[in-house]
Image (cartoon, grey):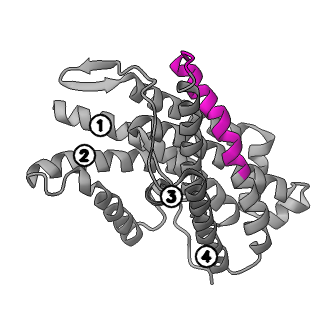
Amino acid sequence: MDTFLQQIINGLTVGSVYALVALGYTMVYGIIGLINFAHGDVVMVGAMVATSVVLALAGGGAAWPALALLGLALLAAIPVCMAIGWTAERYAYRPLRRAPRLAALITAIGVSIIIQNLAMMFWGRGYLNFPHVIEPVVLQLGQARISLLQIGIIASAALIMGALLLLVLKTRLGTAMRATAQNREVAGLMGVNINTVISAAFLIGSALAAVAGVMITAYYGVAQYTMGFMLGLKAFTAAVLGGIGNLPGAMLGGLLLGLIEALGAGYIGDLTGGVFGSHYQDVFSFIVLIAVLIFRPSGLLGERAGDRA
């Protein structure tokens, strides 16, 4: 039971990050039908910028409180990620809105490669180590352990996801987003500025990516220019699991995927003597993706689409 509780804690922590990244995928897909495979690399840039800021401040000799360091790292990472998201939408994706979907998909992969190589040129090929600025305060729950950092990640992700739902359901911008997702042409005829709405979706998704990047690098302690590839694939899997285009589905999918990985790595690793342990936890993510695509392509909360006559 203690092992189960520990894996639940670990799964919710990582799943919260997956959920934030998956929201960026699902917002863009829900509005313009594009799978933005460069989104994981935006998370990577957020992680690299945040780590660089913390390294610069922590190495300056001044004693900064941990919350101040994280806050400044976020203030630096969010505008950079939003600028990348806006630039990609304006100059790479907008000209292809009426092109076949395959053209936009290939362009997204190209944008991903460009971001990775620019990050490699700027930060190098090596790993950036996130300084130990957060006190390792650990609370005991029986034999299970949960750190204040894990509590902060889970609580912050829950607050951000709740705020995003309120934005989409209760504001004029959210109404415009939902109208654009239903029918772009009709929304435009009703006075909705389609370009502004789509840009806003990219900006919000990129800001969430920056927050996820800070969380993941603070949790694991390292950042590297290729880290966004696998993280992006897992977040895409989470979006598909929950029902891509569905915001609550992205949240549910991210949390479930984190739990599946943690429980799979914990229990199956023990049963196989460590052969299929934490080093193979990525396998569980893609088994889930294959199973969802075979048995329920619309996802857990997605609507089944009827065949058109």
Q: Which of marks 4 and 1 is nearer the N terminus?
A: 1
In magenta stretch: residue 239: no
Q: Locate residue 299 relative to residue 166 in the image: left or right.
A: left
Please, what is the three-letter code of the amino acid marked with disc 3? Gly
Q: What element carries label 2?
A: helix
Residues under numbered marks 2 and 3 in contact, where contact means CB atoms less than 8 Å apart: no
- Can residue 38 be seen here? The reply is no
Q: How crowded is mark 1: few (under 14 residues within 10 Å), some or many (20 or more)?
A: some
Please, what is the three-letter code of the amino acid marked with disc 2? Leu
Q: Residues within 10 Å of mark 2 (few under 14, many from 20)?
A: many
For label 1, the residue is 8
Magenta residue span: 61-83
Q: Is mark 4 on a helix, strand or loop?
A: helix
Residues under numbered marks 4 and 3 in contact, where contact means CB atoms less than 8 Å apart: no
- Can residue 91 be seen here? The reply is yes
Location of residue 233 in the rendering, given as x and y in whole percent from the top left corner: 46, 60
Q: Earlier in the sequence, mark 1 or mark 2?
A: 1
Alpha carbon of mark 1 to alpha carbon of mark 3: how far? 23 Å
For label 3, the residue is 243
Residue at 77% x, 54% y is 199
Residue sitting nearer the eye, 51 or 242: 51
Alpha carbon of mark 1 to alpha carbon of mark 2: how far? 7 Å
Name which quarter of the figure residue 132 lies in.
top left
Alpha carbon of mark 4 to alpha carbon of mark 1: how far? 37 Å
Location of residue 225 in the rendering, given as x and y in whole percent from the top left corner: 51, 55
In magenta stretch: residue 68: yes
**Residue 263 got which mark?**
2
Please, what is the three-letter code of the amino acid marked with disc 1? Ile
